[in-house]
Structure formats: structure tokens, C-alpha cells
Image (cartoon, rainbow, N blue to C red):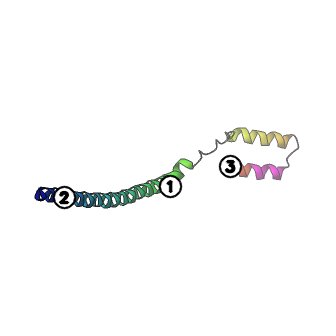
Amino acid sequence: MPGLLRGVARTAVVAGTATAVSGRVQRRQAAKFADRDAQTAADRSRAYEQDRAEQEPAYAAEPPAAQEPQPDLVTQLRELASLKEDGILTEEEFATQKAKLLA
């Protein structure tokens, strides 16, 4: 029976050693893959932020303010003429304002 006991003990030692080695290999591989996955995630995040920063000015730009409708040229000239007739504008002021409108 000592031979049988010795065989069982040897099997237990071999199985224990194999389990310990297997566990260590699994932990090393898990750490290696975790580092690789973390690096990949960081690269993707950096690329996403860069793309977002490039596109952000297009989204951040406010629409141009609506310009007030400009009265048409004829209406403005009539207003100037009425101001001249009322004596508010002199002939020189009228000519200056008229030149600005027509330019």
C-alpha cells in the first residue's frame, strides 16, 4: 500500500503544481489583455474627442442675427427729400446723404 499512497501523493503534487501554474498564466494574460484593452479604449476616446473638437465650431457657431429689413432706396430718398423740404437738412447735407445711399 505504500506504493499506492506514494502515487496518490505524487498525483496531488503534480495536479496542485499544474493548477498554480495555470492560474498564474491566466492572471498574466488577463493583465496583458486588460492593458491592451485600456490602451485601445484610450485611443478611441482620444480620437472621438479630436473629431468632436474639429466639428464643434460648426455646431457652436450661432446663426447670424437677422438683419432688419432695409427700406428700399426710393423710400430713403423720399425721406431725405422731405427732411430737406422741411428745412432740417441743408442742400449740402442732402447731397452728402444722397451720395451715400446711391453708392
Q: Is residue 93 one of those drawn in magenta?
A: yes
- State the residue position of label 2: 9
Q: Where is the N terminus found, in terms of image quarters?
A: bottom left
Mark 3 surroundings: few (<14), some (14-19) or many (≥20) residues within 10 A = few
Q: Is residue 33 left or right of residue 7?
A: right
Q: Residue at x 11, y 59 (%)?
A: 3
Residue 67: % across, % down: 65, 42
Give me the disc on residue 102.
Answer: 3
* Residue 81 versus residue 3 in the image, above or below: above
Residue situated furthest front in the rendering: 1
Q: Which circle, 1 or 2, is nearer the viewer?
A: 2
Q: Main secondary structure of the magenta part?
A: helix
The region drawn magenta spans 88-97
Q: CA distance from mark 1 to mark 2?
A: 65 Å
Q: Secondary structure at mark 1?
A: helix
Q: CA distance from mark 1 to mark 3?
A: 45 Å
Q: CA distance from mark 3 to mark 2?
A: 110 Å
- State the residue position of label 1: 53
Q: Is residue 73 left or right of residue 42?
A: right
Q: Are marks 3 and 2 in contact (CB under 8 Å)?
A: no
